[in-house]
Image (spheres, grey):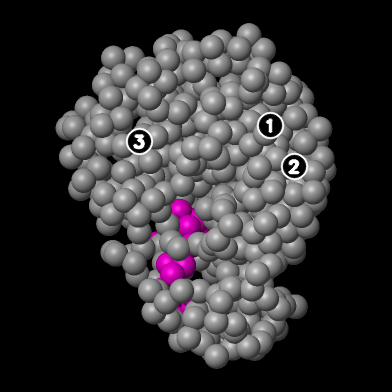
């Protein structure tokens, strides 16, 4: 039987409960085992290649795994660099499994052979995702190694042959955005049944390539394509999931977020709330994409993980110490969205709280004849997870300059405790209590439209995926957090 079939009927291991939030269980941990890597990715946020100078020993890793189990961790995703470039990587998988924690892995797929995959499954690996970032020439260029595309597709096929329903993750940038449909077809044919997409952020190696970064005004068309592929996948048992920097509050928010029958929406950065990340030398962060400077809490060599985790409470989520500013500071959705992905906002504009890579924002500006553009003005220093300097330019849709800050007026932000209703006409969310949809002006119903987010269709798809491999179907977000650092 496929890995995970024994868990049919159990709650999704990474579906966060209110207890997880209130008691701050680090439900999902993304663990960089090493920065050693056999690829040379032009968009690698961690600038992987060589191991960190003082990576944790196997005994130290086992001790941290025990601490995570005590804190309530239910899943650990191993990343790199390339996790399997540590000689003891199989011992680490065994330690995670023996602690009663689900063990997954993200890989670039180069030289990840049938023998390695079979050994990993035997050790206790229950999920696997492979990065595919375009068609063959685009992928090989981005990954820096000829032949890496074919090896990635082969790794997907070998995961499937070994009994793990494989996932795939794709970075969306100016090279890959035009070929998303070709990527969809290729990874589906290879055997992937879960596809996570995430915007490339100018971090690490990508900070040196300003021509790689998608412009904010290109977001709506890109998401139109993703929504079409979402529907195409739903018909074929292939589920598209959004990374944390995909969104927010455009006409497809319900597609990106809904995981059960209840329509869902983005409610802010979850770093250091129920998610935790570790670097290879024991540094603790709230998110695998963020830098330890400003977003870390020390290392597991310095003091117990429980102490570090307790002190990180409230240090990452923007509404606590990093308020919204700029356009996000006046947005109707500010109180619930909290400026989207902290990493994306900070690495583009130098501090979190204002995120131009937003669907609602780009569509609102376009309707007013405006658009935003980002332009690099300073180089990054060349360190893992570093960033350069960028400026945000507001202009007409034809590219003509407009006065700085000349944004269209926005409805006042609402009380975040108010429920949100999904408009049955335009599929935008509005706060309950408003008389009309904020996007199209249609009258808001007192209850959710029965077919608003097509919950029955979503559940039917989840059921079909569960029949293939329950473990992936229930975990839904197994690829999300690791994609940007792979």
* Residue located beneath label 2 in the image: 237
Residue under the point 60% across and 51% down: 242
Please give the residue where the numbered disc 1 appears in the rendered image: 468
Residue at image position (48%, 57%) is 341
Q: Nearer the viewer, residue 157 or 384?
A: 157
The stretch of residues the image draws in magenta is 329-351
Q: Residue at x 74, y 62 (%)?
A: 224
Q: Is residue 421 visible?
A: yes
Element type at marker 3?
loop
Q: Tell which circle, 1 or 2, labels the residue nearer the N-terminal end.
A: 2
**Quarter-of-image position of residue 483:** top right
Query: Does residue 331 belong to the magenta stretch?
Result: yes
Residue 277 visible at all: no
Question: Do labels 1 and 2 touch, CB within 8 Å?
Answer: yes
Left or right of 226: which side holds 330? left
Mark 1 Cα-neighbour bin, 10 Å: few <14, some 14–19, many ≥20? many
Q: Earlier in the sequence, mark 3 or mark 1?
A: 3
Image quadrant containing the C terminus: top right
């Amino acid at each position: 039987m496929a890995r995970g079939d024994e868990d049919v009927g159990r709650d999704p291991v990474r579906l966060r409960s209110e207890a997880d939030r209130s008691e701050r269980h680090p439900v999902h941990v993304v663990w960089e085992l090493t920065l050693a890597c056999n690829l040379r990715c032009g968009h690698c946020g961690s600038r992987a290649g060589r191991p960190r100078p003082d990576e944790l020993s196997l005994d130290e890793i086992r001790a941290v795994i025990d601490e995570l189990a005590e804190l309530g961790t239910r899943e650990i995703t191993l990343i790199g660099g390339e996790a399997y470039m540590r000689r003891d990587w199989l011992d680490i998988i065994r330690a995670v499994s023996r602690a009663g924690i689900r063990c997954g892995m993200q890989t670039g797929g180069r030289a990840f052979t049938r023998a390695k995959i079979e050994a990993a499954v035997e050790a206790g690996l229950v999920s696997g995702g492979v990065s595919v970032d375009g068609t063959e020439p685009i992928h090989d260029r981005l990954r820096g190694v000829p032949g890496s595309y074919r090896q990635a597709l082969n790794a997907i096929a070998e995961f499937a042959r070994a009994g793990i329903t494989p996932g795939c993750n794709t970075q969306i940038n100016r090279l890959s955005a035009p070929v998303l449909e070709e990527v969809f077809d290729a990874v589906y044919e290879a055997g992937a049944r879960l596809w996570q997409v995430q915007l490339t952020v100018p971090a690490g190696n990508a900070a040196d390539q300003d021509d790689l970064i998608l412009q904010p005004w290109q977001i709506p068309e890109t998401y139109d394509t993703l929504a079409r592929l979402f529907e195409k996948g739903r018909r074929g048992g292939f589920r598209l999931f959004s990374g944390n920097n995909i969104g927010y509050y455009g006409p497809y928010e319900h597609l990106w977020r809904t995981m059960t029958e209840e329509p869902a929406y983005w409610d802010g950065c979850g770093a250091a709330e129920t998610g935790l990340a570790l670097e290879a030398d024991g540094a603790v962060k709230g998110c695998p994409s963020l830098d330890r400077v400003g977003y870390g809490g020390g290392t597991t060599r310095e003091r117990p993980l429980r102490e570090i985790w307790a002190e990180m409470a409230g240090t990452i989520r923007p509404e606590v110490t990093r308020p919204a500013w700029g356009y996000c500071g006046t947005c109707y959705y500010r109180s619930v969205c909290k400026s989207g992905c902290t990493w994306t906002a900070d690495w583009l504009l130098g501090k979190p709280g204002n995120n131009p890579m937003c669907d609602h924002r780009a569509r609102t500006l376009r309707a007013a004849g405006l658009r935003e553009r980002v332009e690099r003005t300073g180089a990054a220093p060349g360190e893992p997870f570093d960033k350069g300097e960028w400026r945000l330019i507001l202009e007409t849709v034809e590219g003509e300059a407009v006065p700085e800050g000349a944004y269209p007026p926005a409805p006042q932000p609402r009380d975040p405790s108010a429920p949100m209703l999904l408009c049955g006409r335009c599929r935008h969310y509005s706060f309950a209590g408003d008389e009309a949809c904020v996007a199209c002006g249609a009258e808001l119903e007192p209850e959710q439209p029965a077919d608003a987010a097509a919950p029955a269709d979503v559940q039917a798809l989840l059921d079909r995926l569960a029949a293939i491999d329950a473990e992936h179907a229930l975990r839904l977000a197994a690829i999300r957090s690791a994609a940007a650092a792979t």
